[in-house]
Image (cartoon, coloured by chain):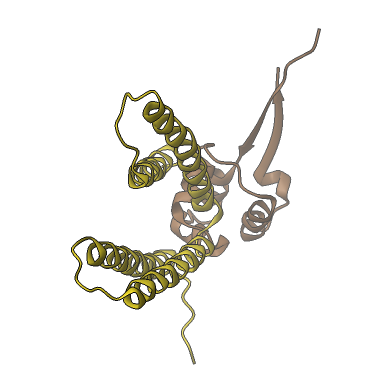
Chain colours: A brown, B yellow
Amino acid sequence: MKNRTKAAITNNVRRLRFDADEMTQATLAEKADVTRQTIIAIEGGKYSPSLELAFKIATVFDVPLESVFQYQEIE
Amino acid sequence: MKKQITDWESRNVKSTIRLLCWTFAWIVTMLLADKAELYQWHSSELISILSIIVNTGIGFGMIMAFMRYLKGMDELQRKIQLNSLALSMGVGFVGGSTFSLLATVRLITDVEYSDVLLLMALTYMAGVIIGQIRYR
């Protein structure tokens, strides 16, 4: 029988913001060149960003991509 | 030196105002062309053709303004727009053919092209509102 897996992308954006001198969502949005709404949606797990935006966010925090976003498969 | 606009809000406001102006001009020229014919404000065929050409030209301007409006958005906003436009187009196709079938079986007397346009516009607006709430 086929195993059905569900993919999920989780992130540490909120924690990384906190570690980065409590950077505001607005500041991160400005640095990543997106709206604050997009940052809110990403943090809330409602929206998975494009690869380009994911790299931009990782660059803002100066960490590797995997430290910001994680890909998980849930059975 | 020209100041670079980095603020999303002001960028969106500018492109929204530009799009609204084009849309308003398109609606006004369409109404003028239509009502002039309906109430016989003139009897010149040349004026009728010119008014249609002007309306179509402004229509293309409106399309270009909408494309600029989309380009000025970030990826989440574009996703919301894409979902809304897809929903609107689908409802337009299905709603249009349903209206047509209803007219064929004589359950409604007349199918107005503007009814389908209105349905599509309302669906698009509902889609944008739902998208904004969903990704809040």
Quarter of image, res A32: bottom right
User: Is A26 left, or right, of A55 in this rendering?
Assistant: left
The residue at the point 65 percent across, 51 percent down is A54
In this view, the residue in front, B42 or B34, is B42
**Is residue B119 shown above or below A3?**
below
Q: Which residue lies furthest to the bottom in this view?
A: B1
In this view, the residue in front, B105 or B20, is B105
User: Is B96 left, or right, of A59 in this rendering?
Assistant: left
Q: Which residue lies furthest to the top in this view?
A: A1
Q: Residue furthest right?
A: A1
Is residue B120 visible from the viewing direction of this image? yes
**Is residue A46 shown above or below B6?**
above
The picture places residue A39, in percent across and down from the top left corner, at 50, 50
The residue at the point 29 percent across, 76 percent down is B44
In this view, the residue in front, B27 or B23, is B27
The picture places residue B30, in percent across and down from the top left corner, at 32, 64
Query: The C terminus of chain B lies in which quarter of the figure?
Result: top left
**Is residue A12 shown above or below A2?**
below
The picture places residue A62, in percent across and down from the top left corner, at 67, 58
The residue at the point 66 percent across, 42 percent down is A69
Quarter of image, res B100: top left
The residue at the point 20 percent across, 67 percent down is B40
**Count of numbered circles on the image:** 0
